[in-house]
Image (tube, rainbow, N blue to C red):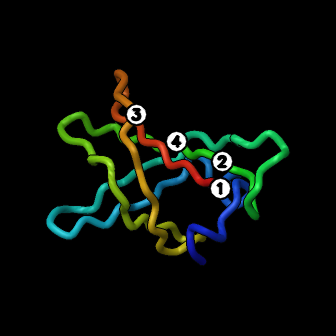
Amino acid sequence: MTSADLTIADFIPLLDQTFRVSMRDSHPYDLTLVRAYDLGDGRAAGPRRPFSLIFSNPRKDSYLPQRTYCLEHGKLGVLEIFLVPIGPDENGMFYEAVFT
């Protein structure tokens, strides 16, 4: 499965589950899927409705810069997903992935 094939329905059952980010030059980085929401208004031109995913990580010592990462999940396998850091709070850093 590629990220182009995914819909929000693939991620809703995976809320609060861990996705592992494979890092070539360091230890794996675990992210938790904390939110999945629909961005469409019913008039989407593409084959799927746009949606967004929010991931969190409690690490405060480092963060992932904006780029495409390989995320691994037991159900979905390995996916290439573009992540954008959207800011920290007292619990750690948050990342967003938008699918159009």
Q: What is the CA distance from the residue labelled 3 to the residue labelled 2?
A: 16 Å
Q: Which mark is residue 86?
A: 3
Q: Which mark is residue 11?
A: 1
At mark 2, the secondary structure is strand
At mark 3, the secondary structure is strand
Image coordinates for residue 83, horizontal then vertical, percent:
41, 50
Q: What is the CA distance from the residue labelled 2 to the residue labelled 1?
A: 10 Å
Q: Residue furthest front?
A: 45
Q: Residue furthest top?
A: 90
Mark 2 Cα shell of 10 Å, populated few (<14), some (14-19), many (≥20):
some
Q: Is residue 60 left or right of residue 84?
A: left
Q: What is the CA distance from the residue labelled 1 to the residue labelled 3?
A: 20 Å
Q: Which residue is mark 4?
A: 54
Q: Which residue is mark 2?
A: 51
The answer to whether mark 4 and mark 3 are in CB contact below 8 A is yes
The answer to whether mark 2 and mark 1 are in CB contact below 8 A is yes
Q: What is the CA distance from the residue labelled 2 to the residue labelled 4?
A: 10 Å
Of tags 2 and 1, the one toward the viewer is 2
Q: Nearer the viewer, residue 2 or 32?
A: 2
- Residue 63 lies, with reference to residue 25, above or below; the image says above
| Amino acid type at image mark 4 | Ile
Q: Residue at x 37, y 23 (%)?
A: 89
Give the quarter of the image for residue 47: bottom right
